[in-house]
Image: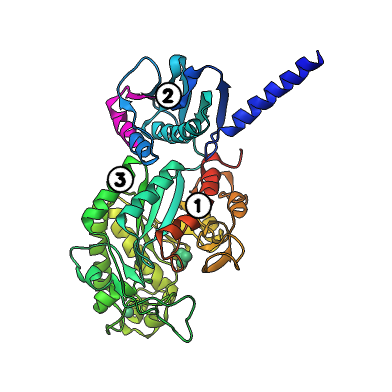
Amino acid sequence: MHSKIISTLIAILFFCLNTAAQTIIPAPQLQIIYPEKSKSSNLANLSCIYAEYVSLQDEAAVFNEFLVKMNYPALEIKSASHDMIKLVLKNTKNEDEYSIQTKENNIIEITGSKSGVFYGLMSMLQLIHQSKSNGTSMSLNIIDGPAYKWRGMHLDVSRHFFPKEFVKKYIDILALHKMNTFHWHLTDDQGWRIEIKKYPLLTQLGSKRKETMVAKNFEPYIGDGKPVEGFYTQEDIKEIVKYATQRHINIVPEIEMPGHALAALTAYPQFSCKKLPLDVLTKWGVSDDVLCTNDSSVRFVEDILDEVLELFPSKYIHIGGDEVPKVRWKECPVCQKIIKDNKLKDEHGLQSYFIKKIDAYVTAKGRSIIGWDEILEGGLAPNAAVMSWRGEEGGIAAAKQKHNVVMTPGAYCYFDHYQGNKNTEPLSIGGFTDLEKVYSYEPTPASLSANEKKYIMGAQANVWTEYIPTTEHVEYMALPRMCALAEVLWTGAKK
Ligand code: ACM
Ligand code: ZN
């Protein structure tokens, strides 16, 4: 009897160990994975994938691309009587929901909408990888869906440029973690990275800087003497947008205005207040030279946005709006006349005037702007969503005004911060945001009413690259913190 209890306990222990050994990140809402003795439930034996509906064939094909990148053979795309993944299309309340169930003969059925099935396949990649590594057979019963609809990661390609192939890899990493938004920070004071046909100098001049400041040698300034350049052609961008779409990732392009625009103004100084020659910034920080707020500068930005809207199907277009020094506007007779003529209160009102024009333009084209929380200053444009980065206050204020919000407060979501001991980590911009801090984040502020909470679309982490010069370094800063953020946004606080 005694030995029977012990053997039962051992069996339970093995069950728990085995169950615990199978991990999906982000953790599913409901996951019952139990080990099977029979070899007939071994995910490592899967040989076919079959999409019952033609519309799911894209998901099957992308799944195979992932398998091959993981050095596993692609599955045959056909129906079989055993060892098969079967994709079943089903309308669900939340389009990202899915379920996975093991049926007879090691047939794994994944059910959901197109995006749901895709997320089911992303879970399968992790399980197959584990199955191939440890050889265990398992039965699956997973019912899953996300806590938030905006699950974002940002990448700054202005401060340092990263090639198209890496952008695709970054998108793969996002997809594997069921993130669905890639915020692509394409322009800033230190480099313009998107081809705009109407204004070729943006890339001919604006994508180049003479050199880069060494470490934090602001005063006295020390440069490295090495020219930096790079941009994405419109063909590159089309290719990347298609790649992301196949992975159920929406790309939100960011074109910074009216500040963080020195690279653009280096190419076209006529759109600045002083109209004097300028140079792409070689040190970190914010340029005092910003776009003038006159009609021709607004037209310049609208022309750029015309091409951006053609390239990116995203509902939201990020227009920056952060950290706009007001010194040039204060001295510019044209800007001062606009303040007077439009009875604006001050330069904050002028910033709001500028953003409202862009808001109206983008809204008329059937899209919406999103901007950093400074766009609240001087009055929020009617259709704008707010990305709250200076803490959560901007997001809270916007939600109270019934505007959509993405939370990205520095203390939790800035992945350019240190994640460990300063003395042993690579040089970073500062701050301290470790894995635990990211895990502790709850994007919906408790201070909002139930109705206001509905405006919190989700959150994202930002990877600013002033001190992140290589692709390996980007990965080092993004991971594993992105895994934690994925659990915050997909798995949610309830779990
Ligand atoms: C920002 O970090 N300046 C949005
Ligand atoms: Zn001006």
Q: Earlier in the sequence, mark 2 or mark 3?
A: 2
Q: Earlier in the sequence, mark 3 or mark 1?
A: 3
**SS label for mark 2:** helix
Tally the numbered discs: 3
Q: Amino acid at mark 2?
A: Asn
Q: Label 1, label 2: how many angstroms apart (C-alpha)? A: 30 Å
The residue indicated by pointer 3 is: 243
**Which residue occupies 47% across, 87% down?**
220
Span shown in magenta: 45-62
The residue indicated by pointer 2 is: 45
Q: Position of residue 68 (x, y in %)?
A: 35, 38
- Which quadrant holds the C terminus? top right
**Which residue occupies 46% across, 43% down?**
177
Q: Position of residue 337 (x, y in %)?
A: 33, 80
Q: Label 3, label 1: how many angstroms apart (C-alpha)? A: 21 Å
Q: Earlier in the sequence, mark 1 or mark 2?
A: 2
- Which quadrant holds the N terminus? top right
Q: Label 2, label 3: how many angstroms apart (C-alpha)? A: 29 Å
**Please, is residue 457 above or below residue 146 in the view?**
below
Q: Amino acid at mark 1?
A: Leu
Q: Is residue 368 visible?
A: no
Query: Residue 479 has which mark?
Result: 1
Q: Is residue 57 magenta?
A: yes
- The residue closer to the viewer here, 274 or 3, is 3
